Image: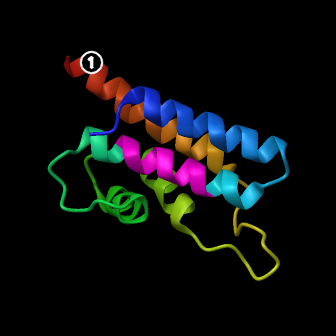
């Protein structure tokens, strides 16, 4: 299980990558952090890599539509011109997933 500290560190890395003009790296790190949050919240899922975990979350009717949509956006491919096919910020999408799932975990403890 991924620790909250490791997830938060990956989000911080995503923000730093963006500041340094590395938008692709920022998106990868955001996706990784969100995937780790899914793995932490659903430890019994058979999916293990961040991409598959986010695809799984997108199909999971037990979570809010907002989180499912964010998961879907994080797995969308960029266009040929390296632009996202939507206006939403991938780091904000990852932060929403992390906050939503880790909040649920804290409420259960």
* Residue topped by disc 1: 107
Q: Spot the residue most to the left.
A: 44
> Residue 73's spot in the image, x, y percent?
56, 60
33 versus 82 height, above or below: above
Is residue 92 on the magenta stretch?
no
Q: Is residue 22 left or right of residue 95?
A: right
Magenta segment main secondary structure? helix
**Relative to 74, 87 lies left or right:** right
The answer to which of 106 and 88 lies nearer the viewer is: 106
Where residue 108 appears, x then y in whole percent? 20, 21
In the rendered structure, the answer to whether residue 39 lies left or right of residue 82 reads: left
The answer to whether residue 65 is visible is no
* Residue 80 placement, left or right of 55: right
- The residue segment tinted magenta is 28-37
Residue depicted at x 30% and y 47%: 39
Q: Residue at x 57, y 69 (%)?
A: 76
Q: Quadrant of the C terminus?
A: top left
Q: Does the image show residue 3?
A: yes
The answer to which quarter of the image holds residue 37 is top left
Asked whether residue 32 is drawn in magenta, I would say yes
Label tally? 1
On the image, the x and y values in percent for residue 21 come to 85, 52
Q: Residue at x 54, y 44 (%)?
A: 94
Characterize the local packing of mark 1: few (<14), some (14-19) or many (20 or more) Cα atoms within 10 angstroms.
Answer: few
Residue 34 in the image: above or below residue 73? above
Identified at 36% across, 35% down, the residue is 101
Q: Which element is circle 1 on?
A: helix
């Amino acid at each position: 299980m991924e620790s909250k500290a490791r997830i938060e560190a990956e989000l911080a890395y995503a923000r730093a990558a963006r500041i340094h003009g590395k938008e692709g790296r920022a998106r990868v790190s955001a996706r990784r952090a969100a995937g780790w949050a899914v793995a932490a919240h659903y430890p019994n899922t058979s999916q293990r890599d961040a991409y598959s975990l986010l695809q799984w979350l997108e199909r999971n009717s037990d979570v809010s539509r907002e989180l499912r949509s964010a998961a879907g956006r994080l797995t969308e491919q960029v266009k040929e011109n390296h632009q996202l096919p939507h206006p939403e910020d991938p780091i904000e999408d990852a932060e929403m997933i992390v906050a939503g799932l880790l909040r649920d975990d804290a409420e259960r403890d």
